[in-house]
Every structure is written in structure tokens, then in C-alpha cells.
Image: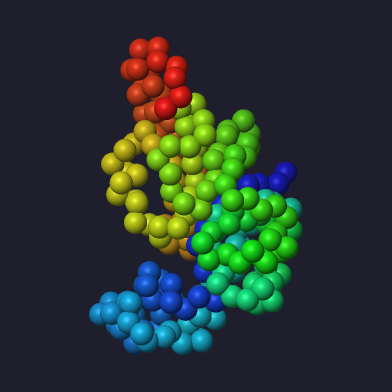
Amino acid sequence: MSRLWFTADLHLGHGNIIKYCQRPFLSPEERKRARMNPRGLWKVSPATVARHDEALLDAINERVGEEDILWVLGDFSLAPLEQARTYRERIRCRHVNLVRGNHDLASYDALFERVLDQGMIKHQGKKIWLNHYPMRSWDKAFHAAWHLYGHVHGRLREEDAANPRLLTRDVGVDTCDFRPLSFEEIADYMAPREAAFRAWRNSLEGDRGEE
């Protein structure tokens, strides 16, 4: 039986994101420079970019099966189409879908089985709203649909944690140990949040209007 997986913000081939986010693929010297000036004009080495790309692709291939379904919630790469194609071809999963991010070229559509700007999917009875960008209200939010997003590279972790009934999850690699998350892992994360959500909704004393 195929499994469902989610990831975002791979930024394959994008050296600047490695230093901006201080991803753990920098050389010791680059790490030192990134701590001091992550937005400086200096560039990470091609070896670091290759190490980064290899690690993220390996993490996908180690977890996601050939017949599984993988959703990439934006920013797959920042490379020209042919380079992006080589990245896609290195992923063994046959069923890779894309939710367009701000760095994805329109020509990337040809690389993926299914492409959305945003939208709802359903898996094992659960509705899941997918968008590259974080939202605070989405279709069927009042009816316990989840919302998965990327884009912010972990900057909303504290805000999400502070609102335990918010059924959202940043699935970007910066928040997920640089690997995809399975539907089951997300369900485990959502379970206590769904309990808090139900308690909140029950407290509304019969209000059935859309939030």
C-alpha cells in the first residue's frame, strides 16, 4: 500500500538559502561566516551545494517508496529547467506532486505528476489544505481540515506552538530534520491539536458558521 509524504523548501542548487538558514551542510569556515553575516555577498562553495543537494535527495529516497506519493509544497529548486529535471530524476518516487512556490519556474510543471497553486486533498478521510504559504484561515478550517505549508523556514514555530488548537504544520525541511514527513507522523503531531480544536469548537455553544 502506498504511503503519503510531504516536504517543502528543498531549494536544490540554491547556495544562498544554505547560508541564509545556516543549514548544517556548510563547511566550518562557511558556518563561521554565516553566523557573522548570513546575508553577506559571499557565496558558499559548489562542494557545499552538492553536499546539501545530495543529503536532501538521499533523505527522500531513504524514506519515500517508488509507488508512494510525495507532495513538495513549493521551492523545489532555483535552477534552470534542465538542472531541475536532473534533481527530479534522482528521486526514485514515481508520483511526485508540486504546490508552486515563489521560486519554482512555470516550466517545472512538466516535471511533476500533479501541480497546484493551492488546494485540498483527502487522505484516509482527512481533508488537507496545501499551500506554499502559511495561512491562518483556509477552506474547511472550521471543520478540522489540516493546513500544511512551507516558505517561512521555521519562523512560525513559536507562533504555532502558542496556539495548540491551530491545525497547521510547517513541512519545510528546515523544521523537519531535512527529510520528508509521512501522513502518519503529521497525524501524530495533529492528534493533541485536534483535541484542543474540538474543545474550542464545542465551547462555541452551537455556532456552526464558517470561521
Q: Identify the colour scheme used.
A: rainbow
Residue at x 62%, y 30% (from the top left corner) = 125
Relative to residue 64, is residue 10 drawn left or right? left
Q: Position of residue 18 (x, y in %)?
A: 43, 74
**Residue 145 as seen in the image, left or right of residue 34:** right
Residue 20 visible here? yes
Residue 91 in the figure: left or right of residue 170:
right
Q: In the image, residue 37 lies at what x, y percent?
A: 28, 79
Residue occupying the far top of the picture: 206
Percent coordinates x, y for residue 149 in the rendering: 48, 50
The residue under the point 63% across, 36% down is 122
Indicate left or right for 150 with 57 as reference. Answer: left
Taking the view exactly as shown, the residue that stands out farthest to the left is 36
Residue 53, above or below 147 = below
The extreme front residue here reads: 106
Residue shown at 36% from the left, 85% from the top = 41
Residue 187 position (above or below residue 89): above
Closer to us: 46 or 65? 46
- The N terminus sits in image quarter: top right
* Res 153 quadrant in image: bottom left
The answer to whether any part of residue 66 appears in the image is no
Query: Foreground residue, 134 or 6?
Result: 134
Is residue 173 positioned above or below 82 on the image? above
Please state which of residues 41 and 156 is positioned toward the viewer in this rendering: 41
Quarter location, residue 42: bottom left
Residue occupying image coordinates x 51% and y 80%? 49
Q: Position of residue 95 (x, y in %)?
A: 72, 55
If the image is split into quadrants, where does the C terminus sit? top left
